[in-house]
Amino acid sequence: MTERLKLTNAVIKYSERVIIHDFSLSVNSGEMVFITGSNGSGKSTLIKTIAGLLPLSSGTLERTAKISYVPQLEEADRDFPARVNEIVLTGTQRRGKLLYSQEDKERAKHAMLELGIYELASRQLTTLSGGQLRRVFIARAICGLGDLLLLDEPCAGLDVQAHEILFAVLRKILDDGCAVLMVTHDESDINGIEGARVINIS
Amino acid sequence: MSEIIELFTYPFVQRALIAGSLISICAAMLGVILVLKHYSLIGHGLSEIGFASLSLAAALNIPALIISAPAVILASFVIMFVSQRYKTSGDIAIALASSAALAFGVIISSVTGKSSNMSGYLFGSVLAITQDELIFAVIISIIIILAFVIFYNRLFLITYNEDYARSLGINIVLYQFIISLMTALIIVTGMRIMGTLLISGIIILPAVSAKSFARGFKSLVIISALISFIAFISGLILSFVFNLPAGASVILSSTIILILVKIFIS
Ligand SMILES: Nc1ncnc2c1ncn2[C@@H]1O[C@H](COP(=O)(O)OP(=O)(O)OP(=O)(O)O)[C@@H](O)[C@H]1O
Ligand SMILES: [Mg+2]
């Protein structure tokens, strides 16, 4: 078991307002951790910091270089002239890697099939429903999967079928040794993965 | 009609055609990124800094590029940095810098008695392109098109969502630098041809038209370039036929295309 994420005494602020006080967390390969907490308690802030989007005010963050991230949905994500497959493929980009290989395209296709959005591959982002867009973001993370998967409320707006697909995918990648950190408000999500840890941050 | 065809046999018209088409195409490709990222004002700000630098070069009697290229490139980095850092005040910074630069340019031109050149700087002189300027325009255009092709996937990703790109470990600042540099190069090259007041129009207008009906990013880039090319050629013809200033005619035809697109597509 290798450590994929180690956060020690983390303090995270927006300007001067402290959102996360002295938080520590360690996640190993193959481990599932759920983050819960009330609205505005700082779950997304924590995930974004781990994803490298926000700085730590103090404390340390050590993590694997290859992470995959499913952000909490924002309205602005939809208003962009792009097709579903163009977006899904971007999940395979990494520093120093400019072009898509044939394998990347296969993986993107596979991820879209898995999430049941392959028929939408050439649809415009603007024409998707909320749940469809969320499936696109999950497929994007899955097709370029790293060693640590961060999901920020991925289930909001998903129907029963998509929810089941997501959890089947999660169980598979956990078996393969990926570590998963997922924000949720739903008790039944937590029961969906055996041996998962739950951390409440509020 | 045959007169127009005959016109295209003159070397100065051919130079205008080649340089103008290439610059229009490159500007419109870049315009897609700038419009989608809400950086439309940057082109405008930079071109006014370009104007100031042209006035300064004329006053000091040195070749324009020696001052304007570094000045515009530097300014593009500063503007990009400021609008990144202080998200909401970026447009204010651009407006301030560009009007200050414009005032500076006008004062230099009139103090040194070179204000007769001013209209050339402001409105361009597409029909007075020299052989050297043509070569410069061709080289810059090739660089920009190559950069666009090589970095296409990355530019797409960063234009769509910088945060997501950052989560993949991608160096965002490097690509902001590349986008700024390409914008600066297009402006430096294009302002002699289109004029400093009009160059930002050929960057922005075709992208806005194309956005009305392109469905994906790739088609948006291609349609934008195509519209820009058509606007340039038709603008040039318009200027011959009605004896109008070339740069302004190109912008006019681009504006007409935009209006038609808005009426018939949306
Ligand atoms: N960009 C920002 N600037 C300043 N404050 C912010 C910013 N984003 C979030 N906040 C504040 O930080 C706190 C934590 O926000 P965060 O988005 O992390 O909450 P959350 O736990 O994810 O909530 P939710 O369950 O609604 O998604 C909130 O009080 C919010 O108002
Ligand atoms: Mg949140």
Image (cartoon, coloured by chain):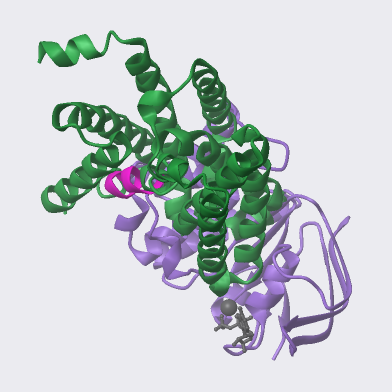
Chain colours: A purple, B green
Residue at 71% of width from left, 75% of height from top?
A46
Quarter of the displayed picture in which ligand 2 can be seen: bottom right
Can the viewer see residue B37?
A: no
The answer to whether residue A142 is left or right of residue B225 is right
Q: Does B170 appear in magenta?
A: no
- Camera-side residue: B31 or A190? B31
Task: State which quarter of the image contains the C terminus of chain B.
Answer: bottom left
Q: Is residue B152 above or below residue A39?
A: above
Residue at 40% of width from left, 17% of height from top?
B15
Residue at 64% of width from left, 87% of height from top?
A37
Q: Tag count in the figure?
A: 0
Can the viewer see residue B207?
A: yes
What main secondary structure does the magenta stretch of the protein show? helix
Residue B231: image location, x then y, percent: 26, 34
- Camera-side residue: B68 or B185? B68
Residue A49 found in image quarter: bottom right
Residue at 61% of width from left, 51% of height from top?
B76
Residue B25 found in image quarter: top left
Q: Which residues are magenta?
A: B203-210
Q: Is residue B95 above or below residue A105?
A: below
Residue B10: image location, x then y, percent: 31, 10
- Camera-side residue: B137 or A162? B137
Q: Is residue B33 above or below residue A132?
A: above
Task: State which quarter of the image contains the N terminus of chain B.
Answer: top left
- Camera-side residue: A3 or A13? A13
Residue B29: image location, x then y, percent: 43, 37
Q: Is residue B143 above or below residue A195?
A: above
Q: Does B208 appear in magenta?
A: yes
Residue B190: image location, x then y, percent: 47, 36
